Amino acid sequence: MLALHVPKGGARVVDFSVGEGRNLYYYPKDTVQVVGVNPNPKVPMLEAQAAYAKVPIRILPDVSRLPANSMDAVVSVQGMEDMSDEQVETVLRDAVRVLKPGKKFIYIENVGAENPLVLAAQQSIEGLGKLFGKKYTVTRDLLSFILKTKGFEVIKYQVVLGFQDPHIVGIATKKQQTTTGAGIGKDTIPKKNKKEKVPQQTGLSDPQKIEFSGQ
C-alpha cells in the first residue's frame, strides 16, 4: 500500500504510526524524508530501523512545526487505535494542513466487524483496555471522521477481512487549490445569484468503495 501510493521521486512523508519503525521498510527507496510523529519515541530504535531501511527519518512529537502544504504524503497504519476521537480529528486536520494540494492521506485502520460475534469480541477488547486505563479503539467508524474533515475532495476505501479482522484501507486526496482574482492558492468560491438558490458546495465527492491491489 505504501510502496504503491507514496509518490516516488523524492517524497517527504509524515507518518502518524511510526511506532518502532515497521513502516519504514515499505516506503519507496528514493523517499527523501519520513517525519515520524511520536510523543514518546524510542529514538535509538527508530534511528536504527531507519538506517536498516535506508530511509532518512526526523522524529517529532507533533506536526505543529511543519509548514503548510509541504508534504507529499501522510500515512497512518493502525496509528489511531490508541487515540481518542478528539485526537483523530486533530490528526486529520493536521494531515490536510501539511499535505500539498492534490496529495494523499493513506490509511489502514481497524473498524468494527460486520460479524456480531467478532464485533462483540472487539468491544470486549476495548472494555479491557479501559479497565487498565488505556484508550484502545478498534471499532471506530474512521470513514465518517474523514468525511467530516474539511479539505479532502476524493476519498477511496476498501474494508478488508470484514468478518474476521476488519480494517479499512484507503486514500483521501487533499483538495486542489485554484488561482482566483484574489490571489494564488485560494479556493474558488462561486458567486451566488440572489434570484436562485445555490446548493451548498462542499468540494467532496461521494466516497468510492474500491479494491486496492498490492496491500
Image: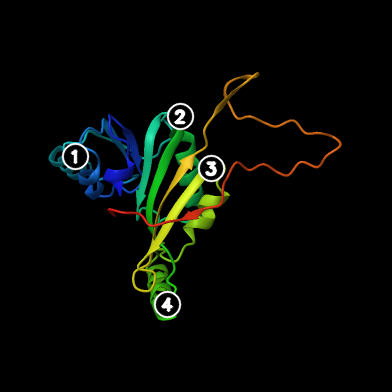
Which dot, 1 or 4, sits closer to the camera?
4
- Earlier in the chain: of badge 4 and badge 2, it is 2
Tag 2: amino acid:
Asn
Residue drawn at 42 percent across, 77 percent down: 115
**Image coords of residue 29 (percent x, y):** 20, 36
> Could you tell me the amino acid type at mark 4?
Asn
The image shows residue 119 at horizontal and vertical percentages of 43, 75
Of the numbered discs 1 and 3, the one sitting upstream in the chain is 1
First reached walking from the N terminus: tag 3 or tag 2: 2
Name which quarter of the figure residue 15 lies in: top left
Say whether disc 2 or disc 1 marks the residue closer to the N-terminus: 1
Res 35 quadrant in image: top left
Disc 3: CA contacts within 10 A as few (<14), some (14-19) or many (>=20): some
Q: Earlier in the sequence, mark 4 or mark 3?
A: 4
Residue 129 or 36: which is nearer the viewer?
36
Outermost residue on the left side: it is: 52
* Label 4 CA crowd tier, 10 Å (few <14, some 14–19, many 20+): some
The amino acid pointed to by label 3 is Glu
Question: Nearer the observer, disc 1 or disc 3?
Answer: 3
Query: Is mark 3 in CB contact (under 8 Å) with mark 2?
Result: no
**Residue for badge 4:** 115
The amino acid type found where label 1 is placed reads: Ala
Q: Cβ–Cβ below 8 Å for labels 1 and 3?
A: no
For the residues labelled 1 and 3, the Cα–Cα distance comes to: 32 Å
Residue at image x 54%, y 40%? 151
Query: According to the image, label 3 marks what residue?
Result: 153
Q: Secondary structure at mark 3?
A: strand
According to the image, label 2 marks what residue? 69
> What secondary structure is found at the residue carrying circle 4?
loop
